[in-house]
Image: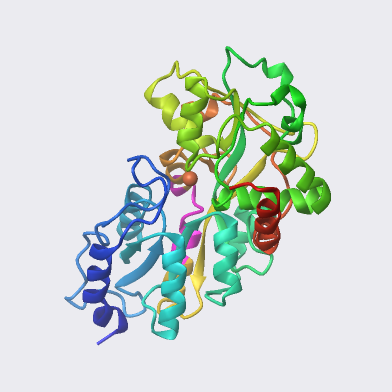
Amino acid sequence: MNLVTRWLPMLLAVVLLAACSNDESAAPSGDDVEPAAPAGSDAAPAEDGSTAPTSPERLVVYTSRQPHLVEPLFDDFTEETGIAIDYISDSEAALIERLAAEGDRTPASVLITVDAGNLWQAAERGLLQPIDSDVLDERIPAELRDPDDQWFGLSIRARTLVYHPDRVDPADLSTYQALTAPEWAGRLCLRTSRKVYNQSLVAMMIERLGEERTEQIVAGWLENLATEPFSSDTRLIEAVAAGQCDVGLVNTYYLGRLQKDDPDYPVELFWANQDTSGVHVNISGAGLTTHAPEPAAGRQLIEWMTGLDAQQFIAASNMEYPVVDDVPLDPTVAAWGEFEADSINLRVAGQRQAEAVRLMDRAGWR
Ligand code: FE
């Protein structure tokens, strides 16, 4: 009786009970987990003994990504390798707590989630183990993976400026910090500081600009707010479209979804800091769990996800960017043009997360 077989009934129960804790759950296109995801692939366990003895029947993955962003990938992986995947879909915080509580009894070999801040947390709590892989080192740019090889970026998400084209001349836009200028008074919209996306952005700013300067910038943004911070990037973009604010700061895929539904959607994207530090980027990514029951298959899955076909799906399915070069982009994403990204290693987003949270708190960013 292997571990996974013993755990399977419990896994299914957990998935059915999984509650959504994400603030964008109401939106069907929300980035993160939705409630009561169906468990696993449809692939039947190889009970006829035909599976090669070294190949595991099943791999268990914990993921905060929505089922539609991972299930087609898992199905392809199963088809190519014969390794079926069961997954639990929940918020990243719940999954990290779960891994910690399970310890060496965890059925999960792989954790897939968004934001380096979250992956760093998992690594910091001892829940991930390094993968020594030439494939991952070659395919994933160094700044998008952990220097200690505990997590690896699988897609890039850019956090930049959006504006209303009738009320803002893009020639007046330049950098994140320039939105502190008096001309933007009462015109800026931000999302809540409780979202890890903003925590990571501020953490990277502290690294680049120092704490004092970053605090001035954050205070300057808050001075210019048109309204209270929003609970989601989508609501923020909708507020720009509706004229409640003129400019805002969001992850690009949220705009992509709205533009896909309505090509004339009245909000445009602007690539910030192109003459200086580059656009703030983050990742969705994966790591091998410390107590992975199937470490070889887990590593195989993560490496497989950097292949061209997988990369194209991962990037296009949520209108993000691939981590690997020469992967075709979704047409809406391609239309935004190329951009220079910040090249500081994303581990900083985790290392300075607590500092960033304290800074935003002091500044009064709710
Ligand atoms: Fe998101």
Considering every residue shown, the one lying at the far left of the view is 48
> Would you say residue 210 is visible in this rendering?
no
Residue 290 in view here: yes
Residue 132 is inside the magenta segment: no
Residue 164: x percent and y percent?
A: 57, 19
Relative to 328, residue 57 above or below: below
Judged by its main secondary structure, the magenta piece is helix
Q: Is residue 303 magenta?
A: yes
Q: Residue furthest bottom?
A: 1
Q: Where does the image place residue 88, in percent across and percent down from the top left? A: 33, 64
In which quarter of the view is residue 29 placed? top left
How many discs mark residues in the rendered view?
0
Q: Nearer the viewer, residue 216 or 128?
A: 216
Q: Which residues are magenta?
A: 300-310
Q: Is residue 32 left or right of residue 128?
A: left
231 left or right of 73?
Answer: right
Q: Residue at x 57, y 45 (%)?
A: 156
Foreground residue, 43 or 179? Answer: 179
Q: Is residue 249 above or below residue 75?
A: above
Percent across and percent down for residue 345 are 71, 55
> Which sits in the foreground, 242 or 325?
242
Residue 300's place in the image compared with 155, above or below, is: below
Tell me the quarter of the image containing the N terminus.
bottom left
- Side of 241 relative to 349 (left or right): left
Residue at 76 percent of width and 25 percent of height? 182
Position of residue 232 measured from the top left corner of the image (x, y, whole percent): 47, 41
- Image colouring: rainbow
Give me the residue at 73% from left, 42% from top.
219
- Residue under the image location 76 percent in, 41 percent down: 217
